[in-house]
Amino acid sequence: MDGQLANLFAIQLQHFSIWEAIAVALGLAYVLMAAREIVWAWPAAFVSTAIYMVIFWEGNLPMQSALNLFYMGMAAYGWWLWQVQPSREAAATNTDIKPLAIHTWGLGRHALWISLGVLLTFSFGGLLTLFEASQMPYLDAGVMVFSMMTTFLMARKVLESWFYWIVINTFAVALYWQTGYPLTAMMFVAYMGLAWYGMIKWQLRFRAQTT
């Protein structure tokens, strides 16, 4: 059994490209910097997603290509949002100006958010199935929809965005492995661990804000 898994893994690795490797490296850098609230996370995300937009379009995963086009826009938005807000050090010297703070959502708001995501997932998944436009239509659509929605929460510094990423990344691993992107699948395994790290870091900072 272990030998079969090793052979499967070796076969998958034969299909990765140098561009996928670059996108993976920049994607990991994005998460690490975002967890530390470093604004350079967003340029790293922009370049990584630009590469993935092309890779996934060529690989017949249109929703993932569209997702990464969206990510490019969100990277620009995140850069603007974090840049226009003063640093914590600057805010400490001016009581009238405060940085964008980490905050939480209530259960009701999350329930509505998730319901919207499920509705959009089935809508896009149905269209992809109808037009035979994706290798894995519903999984492709679900990862796209919830990733888009969670990126918005991330840019707004909603604490629970990290929990959403843990769940999304679990499904993303299956999607990318099954469709022939082994390095990207491994990156999303790492993302799951980094999402826990990010959640803990933001939780500590959130508590510090409220004391």
Image (tube, grey):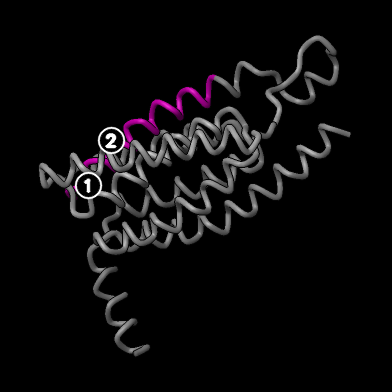
| Label 1 secondary element | loop
Q: Amino acid at mark 1?
A: Leu
Vertical position of residue 154 compared to residue 5: above or below? above
Write the residue at 76% across / 26% down: 88
Give the x, y percent position of residue 33: 59, 42
Task: Find the distance from the CA under tag 1 to the CA under tag 2.
Answer: 9 Å
Give the x, y percent position of residue 38: 63, 35
Residue picked out by circle 2: 66
Q: Amino acid at mark 2?
A: Ala
Write the residue at 45% across / 50% down: 168
Write the residue at 48% across / 22% down: 77
Figure quadrant of residue 161: top right
Left or right of 205? Residue 167 is left
Residue picked out by circle 1: 61
Figure quadrant of residue 54: top left
- Residue range of the region highlighted in magenta in the rendering: 59-80
Mark before the other along the chain sequence, 1 or 2: 1
Q: Work out whether residue 148 or residue 29 is closer to the camera in this orientation and state it.
A: 148
Q: Quadrant of the C terminus?
A: top right
Q: Quadrant of the N terminus?
A: bottom left
